[in-house]
Image (cartoon, helix red, strand yellow):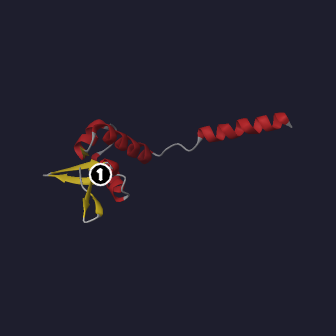
Amino acid sequence: ITETWRLMLHQTIGLVADGEPLSKEEQLENKIESLIAREGPCTARELRRHIHGMSSGELQKIVKTMVETERLMLCHQGKATQYGLPQDAPILEEKGEQDYVPF
């Protein structure tokens, strides 16, 4: 009985360790988030320069999805559009309400 339990434990650990691999989009989203966390708010051009193997169309699609799901925030700086992490945005208090303010 003990040997059976030990074998089942090893099989369970193997299943958990393998897990599901991340899709290409998930890997790119993680790269974008870690880059912005490290470098601060970036333009699409800066993101593209640091992340290789991604077309500009693919980058725009991923960034748009990340903004829609609120994983990134959008901030217009003159003509440039920067993307940042929501937790990096300062909070402005007006009339007792908290509103996010772009970078």
Q: Residue at x 33, y 51 (%)?
A: 86
Q: Report the residue marked by disc 1.
A: 60
Q: Residue at x 60, y 39 (%)?
A: 18
Left or right side of 85 for 2: right
Q: Secondary structure at mark 1?
A: helix
Total numbered labels: 1
Residue furthest to the bottom: 95
Residue furthest to the right: 1
**Residue 54: horizontal and vertical position, in percent?**
33, 42
Along the line of sight, the residue nearer the viewer: 12 or 90: 90
**Residue 22: horizontal and vertical position, in percent?**
49, 44
- The answer to which image quadrant residue 36 occupies is top left
Give the amino acid type for the residue marked by disc 1 in the picture.
Gln
Mark 1 Cα-neighbour bin, 10 Å: few <14, some 14–19, many ≥20: few
Left or right side of 39 for 1: right
Give the quadrant of the N terminus: top right
Along the line of sight, the residue nearer the viewer: 52 or 69: 69
**Residue 32: horizontal and vertical position, in percent?**
35, 43
Q: Residue at x 28, y 50 (%)?
A: 89
Residue furthest to the front: 96
Placement of 51 over or under 91, stated as above or below:
above
Placement of 63 over or under 3, stated as above or below:
below
Left or right side of 61 for 20: right
**Residue 39: horizontal and vertical position, in percent?**
28, 37
Q: Residue at x 36, y 56 (%)?
A: 70
